[in-house]
Amino acid sequence: MKSTPTSPLMSTITIAQNSAHPLTVNRLGYGTMRLTGPEIWGEPTNRPEALQILRTAVELGVNFIDTADYYGEDVTNRLIAEALYPYPQDLVICTKVGATRRPDKSWVPFNTPENLRTSIDNNLRTLRQEQIQLVHLRLMGHGPVPLDEQLRAMFEMQREGKILHVGLSNVTREELETGLALGPIATVENMYSYAQRTTVQLPHGANPGGEEVLDLCEQHGIPLIPFFSLIHGLPKAGNKIAEIAQKHNATEAQINIAWLLHKSPWILPIPGTSSLAHFRENLAAATFHLSPEDIAYLG
């Protein structure tokens, strides 16, 4: 029998709440990117542990899993299918399209309408699904394919039944506003953490921060899904998060997750790890209650 963690913070969040097919999930998900080999490439170092993390996540009540066919490539999708298929009825698997990897491990756009259709078909095949419940269109800078052309291709596949809901990833406020004018945007996935809230420059381009779109997401009832929140944020966090972690006998990573959960009921964290022990630590972050004084001190 599935055992869901008992915590006021392990509440639920509804994706596409005003649609004909809303999806309600527990408010702490799992991002699979770190299950791959070094540099998000190749097979996991410890394959049995990777499979066990996925199975443990579902056993403990995690029912939102984030993946992409360009993780590995195709590694995380195949691990998910191996570990969890046939899938529990309440499990939501979210994937991403719009990018691919070159043999030199670089990240490049893959976002023409034909590219996007190829990616969706590949995700359907590797995940063993007839329809993908949620797909994020990942924006990879200002390339030759306009956002409206990319999104129209996504909405066309939604009408065909290949996709249930369409989300956006790595978007600025202006790009989100453009997306909302073109059709229903179910979710937004941006980099966001206690210490990394606005745009950060990475080798493969700029990553807009969650703070830039959070209020717009709240206004439209759109869940904001933070990614990379444990990797890029904590080294810059300074002493405050360390002090709050010591107060609660917690790790800084746990306080970062708890801060995100407290920040807004529209935030759905998906902390990722390749360690089963660290996964359990991350999940325990849903049990921490940060006081108003804690939140005020963190700022």
Image (spheres, rainbow, N blue to C red):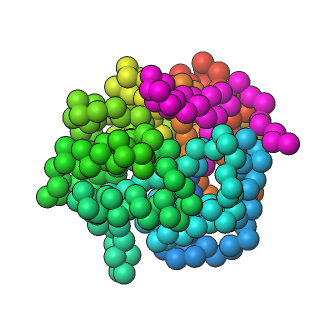
**Looking at the image, can residue 223 be seen?**
yes
Q: Residue at x 50, y 44 (%)?
A: 133
Q: Nearer the viewer, residue 130 or 210?
A: 130
Q: Residue at x 34, y 76 (%)?
A: 102
Q: Looking at the rendering, which quadrant does residue 218 occupy? A: top left
Residue 293 is covered by the magenta coloring: no
Tally of numbered discs: 0
Q: Residue at x 24, y 39 (%)?
A: 175
Q: Nearer the viewer, residue 61 or 260?
A: 61
Answer above or below: position of 77 versus 256: below
Query: Residue 19, position in %: x, y?
Result: 44, 26
Which quadrant of the figure contains the N terminus? top right
Residue 29 is covered by the magenta coloring: yes
- Residue that extends furthest to the left in the rendered view of this protein: 144
- Residue that extends furthest to the right in the rendered view of this protein: 1
- Residue that extends furthest to the front in the rendered view of this protein: 160
Answer above or below: position of 238 versus 102: above
Judge from the rendering whether residue 280 lies leftward or rightward of residue 177; answer left or right. right
**Which secondary structure class fits the magenta region best?**
loop
Judge from the rendering whether residue 20 lies leftward or rightward of residue 173; answer left or right. right
Query: Residue 281, position in %: x, y?
Result: 72, 48
Span colored in magenta: 1-30
Query: Residue 99, position in %: x, y?
Result: 33, 62
Q: Looking at the rendering, which quadrant does residue 201 occupy? A: bottom left
Judge from the rendering whether residue 160 lies leftward or rightward of residue 244; answer left or right. left
Q: Residue at x 68, y 73 (%)?
A: 47
